[in-house]
Image (cartoon, grey):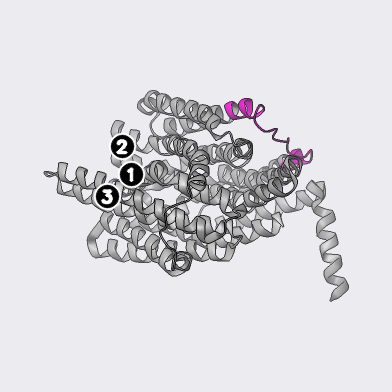
């Protein structure tokens, strides 16, 4: 079930990921570094505010809706009630800031549209959480694909009409809102905004609120470098860095999150139905699949970063962003191991408050190293700071989780994944100087083929046995 659901979520997120890569490719050609930098800084600010105000509610839905005994309607009604209260609170705060910024019309507009984007993103992510909790990867994929498609299409049209950064932001806003209306509205129709069950609110709050601080600090680790690059260097430098960062995140992050999207509900279900040992076994399977997909992806990005940047990014971005791509790929791998494997122990042990120590350490390291290394090394300094921050956070999480929930070691066959990835790198080595889209397609094909072949030869995780059994069944019934 884990492999099947992971494949469904990978397909469900694959099309949106391709569209998001097209967004990076088109926007880095249609917008200059300054405009793209402004766009990414606004999006990062909205994501940070979403983490502060709404993430606890979204996380509570993911954790408690699959096992809620009071029925879906009771929980959805409580979530809708709290969401509207938070919309009102952020409207008051945002309105006060807009009134204060009377002299700067551009900044007033950005703040105003940012508040509306905050509401749209939160509602969109609530709909994703409901779809995921109900084991509905197709609806999850439809939401994600429609949002990405609308953001790309409308954003590109508005940019070509001369709206620049404003057009890109309005396209993203429309994508969040229209996708939620199209595929999420049915969950909310007929919901009565009754007074929420106090016990339910207490469960949501006690589980999610510590994670709100966690999410805020995580966004500081992943986004503060953009703000600091804009402050210490220029908005254009932040735009170039963001292009390389987002390209690595959209590829490696997509693969790891697809596994987690499938694995986490199964781990929770195993915990609820059969206890901690069953959850650990499910977690061990998840770790093997997580590493089996992510490690070769990072290896490929590191080997082929020059051609990837040349093919996907605009000329004003490609050279400098290509230096960032392999470093951020490593950082995303460390972040994924931490978030989608080690940190699940804190969630299963209902001790999410202890996660704060690891993320606070990572955030502090990231900010201090950025302040030190950006003036010395520029964009590469920010990328190295990100690697160091996620490495510190991972080490602290490993140390602390032992007293909360014993996270199992990955299966012994994991070393075979590393051997297969290393062999793939050796195969790709003679091709690293090749340039152009055709060369990139051939390089990717060569890398995937080599990795799969070495998995077969090493029989990693019983890969050869499972494929042989599957082919044998198909041949038998053919």
Give me the residue at 41% from left, 35% from top.
220
**Residue topped by disc 1:** 41
Distance from label 3 to label 1 (Cα)?
Answer: 21 Å
Residues drawn in magenta: 396-417
Give me the residue at 69% from left, 40% from top.
422
Q: How many marks?
A: 3
Label 2 secondary element: helix
Distance from label 2 to label 3 (Cα)?
Answer: 27 Å
Q: For the residues carrying marks 3 and 1, which lies nearer the camera in this image?
A: 3
**Residue topped by disc 3:** 91
Mark 3 or 1, nearer chain start: 1
Contact between labelled residues 1 and 2, with CB atoms less than 8 Å apart: yes
Contact between labelled residues 1 and 3, with CB atoms less than 8 Å apart: no
Q: Nearer the viewer, residue 277 or 108?
A: 277
**Residue topped by disc 2:** 230
The percent coordinates of residue 306 (x first, y second) are 50, 45
Give me the residue at 30% from left, 50% from top.
88
Label 3 secondary element: helix
Mark 2 or 1, nearer chain start: 1
The percent coordinates of residue 125 (x first, y second) are 46, 54
The image shows residue 282, relative to residue 345, as above or below, that is below
Residue 458 appears in view: yes
């Amino acid at each position: 079930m884990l492999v099947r659901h992971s494949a469904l979520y990978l397909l469900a997120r694959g099309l949106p990921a391709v569209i998001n890569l097209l967004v990076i490719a088109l926007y880095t050609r249609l917008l200059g570094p300054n405009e793209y930098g402004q766009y990414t800084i606004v999006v990062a600010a909205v994501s940070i505010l979403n983490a502060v105000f709404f993430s606890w509610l979204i996380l509570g839905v993911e954790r408690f809706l699959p096992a809620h005994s009071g029925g879906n309607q009771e929980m959805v009604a409580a979530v809708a009630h709290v969401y509207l209260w938070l919309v009102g609170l952020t409207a008051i705060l945002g309105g006060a800031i807009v009134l204060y910024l009377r002299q700067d019309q551009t900044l007033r507009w950005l703040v105003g549209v940012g508040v509306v984007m905050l509401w749209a993103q939160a509602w969109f992510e609530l709909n994703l959480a409901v779809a995921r909790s109900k084991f509905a990867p197709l609806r999850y994929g439809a939401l994600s694909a429609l949002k990405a498609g609308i953001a790309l299409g409308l954003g590109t049209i508005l940019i070509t009409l001369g709206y620049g950064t404003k057009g890109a932001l309005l396209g993203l806003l429309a994508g969040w809102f229209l996708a939620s209306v199209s595929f999420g509205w049915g969950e909310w129709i007929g919901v009565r905004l009754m007074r929420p069950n106090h016990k339910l609110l207490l469960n949501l709050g006690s589980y999610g609120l510590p994670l709100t601080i966690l999410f805020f600090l995580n966004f500081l680790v992943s986004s503060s470098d953009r703000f600091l690059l804009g402050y210490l260097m220029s908005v254009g430098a932040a735009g170039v860095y963001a292009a390389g960062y987002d390209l690595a995140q959209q590829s490696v992050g997509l693969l790891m999150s697809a596994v987690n999207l499938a694995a986490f509900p199964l781990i929770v279900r195993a915990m609820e139905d059969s206890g901690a040992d069953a959850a650990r076994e499910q977690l061990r399977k998840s770790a093997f699949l997580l590493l089996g997909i992510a490690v070769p992806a990072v290896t490929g990005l590191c080997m082929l970063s020059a051609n990837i940047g040349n093919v996907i990014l605009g000329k004003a971005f490609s050279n400098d962003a290509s230096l960032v791509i392999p470093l951020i790929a490593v950082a995303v791998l460390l972040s994924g191991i931490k978030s989608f494997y080690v940190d699940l122990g804190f969630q299963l042990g209902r001790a999410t408050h202890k996660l704060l120590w690891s993320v606070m350490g990572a955030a502090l390291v990231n900010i201090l190293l950025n302040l030190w290394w950006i003036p010395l090394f520029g964009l590469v300094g920010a990328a190295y700071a990100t690697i160091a921050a996620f490495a510190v956070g991972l080490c602290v999480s490993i140390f602390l989780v032992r007293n909360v929930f014993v996270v199992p070691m990955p299966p012994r066959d994991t070393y075979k994944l590393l051997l297969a990835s290393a062999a793939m790198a050796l195969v790709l080595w003679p091709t690293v100087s090749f340039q152009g889209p055709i060369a990139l397609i051939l390089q990717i094909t060569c890398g995937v083929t080599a990795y799969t072949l070495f998995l077969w030869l090493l029989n990693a995780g019983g890969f050869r046995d499972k494929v042989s059994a599957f082919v044998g069944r198909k041949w038998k019934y053919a």
